[in-house]
Amino acid sequence: MNLKILTAENITQFAPNILREVTGETPFSEKLAPFLASAKAWLEAEYLGPDDFLSPEENKVAVRVVVTKAYADALPSLDIVVTPTGIGVVNTDTIAPASKERVERLVKSLRDILHDNLTLLVDLCHKYPAWRESEPGRFFCATFLSSLLDLRAMPKGVTFEDMRLKALIVEQKMADRFLGHNLMSAMRDAENARREAGSPQEALCRSLCKKAVAALVAAPDPVPHYNAIWEECSHVINAVDDCPEYLEIWTAEMRGVLTKPFDNNIKGSYYF
């Protein structure tokens, strides 16, 4: 990312609150500088990677993430307080120190803003090959559930790391038993690159596969049962039958290998 667009003069453009400085005080930008450096290092190590590949507008989202995190991290140690009209410096005669609760609410609001912008930024990154090939990109794109928004379909308390780990297991079993590794890779790569589908049926296959992964990952069983995996994969296979783009890939690997789970549908208590 490019942090050069961030200057002492425009830092308030990216900070989500009104900042006031008192003459003679250390400028806010100087107080924030070490936190900005730390936030940039965190963002590049965990999410972006070292390359500068974002467009100018998308880079502004990254800068906003850095400033918001730096601001939230720095706030408890800064001599500023919350007021009805913005933020002021404590050592003036006309401003009373903010309560602990108000500071905590402000920090929480900053964390919420940080999460929303980070979610947007990760989704924007998917379209860039440089990002998908980076270490953070490979981490996110290892499964169909590569967006922070996918956590919304998970039980409360599940982290992205938890979701990703189970998704790796689920997708491996889906590929081993029913869909084939080549088809899973083709659909996953296309989905994670946010590529436009070649046909409505191709888009349907990818959508059904991601929906199947999400359902199996959200299920309470640590390792989904064979029949549960088949139930989800059967919808994908039915869609693949009408999708020439994917049918050839699936047939080459799985036709003749696929076996459906046994279903005792013959009525009578003495049938075995």
Image: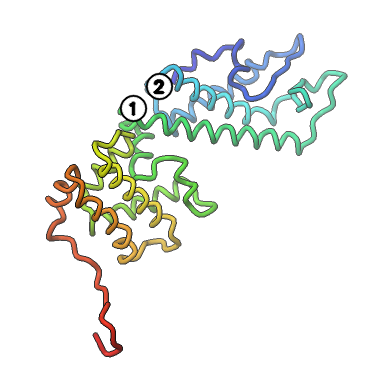
Tell me the residue at 34%/29% (across/down): 127
Taking the image as shown, residue 75 lies to the left or right of residue 6, namely right
| Type of amino acid at the residue the image marks with label 2 | Leu
The kind of residue tagged 1 is Tyr
- Residue 165 in the image: x percent, y percent? 39, 50
Quarter of the image where one finds residue 56: top left
Residue 271 % position (x, y): 25, 86
Residue, x 22% and y 47% (percent of image)?
A: 183
Q: Quadrant of the N terminus?
A: top left
- The reply to whether dot 2 and dot 1 touch (C-beta < 8 Å) is yes
Asked whether, in this view, residue 153 is left or right of residue 186, the answer is right
- What residue is shown with label 1? 128
In the displayed structure image, the side of residue 237 where residue 89 appears, left or right: right
Q: Is residue 189 above or below residue 23?
A: below
In this view, the residue in front, 197 or 64, is 197
- Give the residue pinned by disc 2: 54
Label 2: which secondary element: loop
Sequence-first disc among 2 and 1: 2
- Residue 156 vertical placement versus 65 (above, below): below
The one of 86 and 24 positioned closer to us in this rendering: 86
Colour convention:
rainbow
- Number of marks: 2
Residue located farthest toward the bottom when viewing the structure as drawn:
270
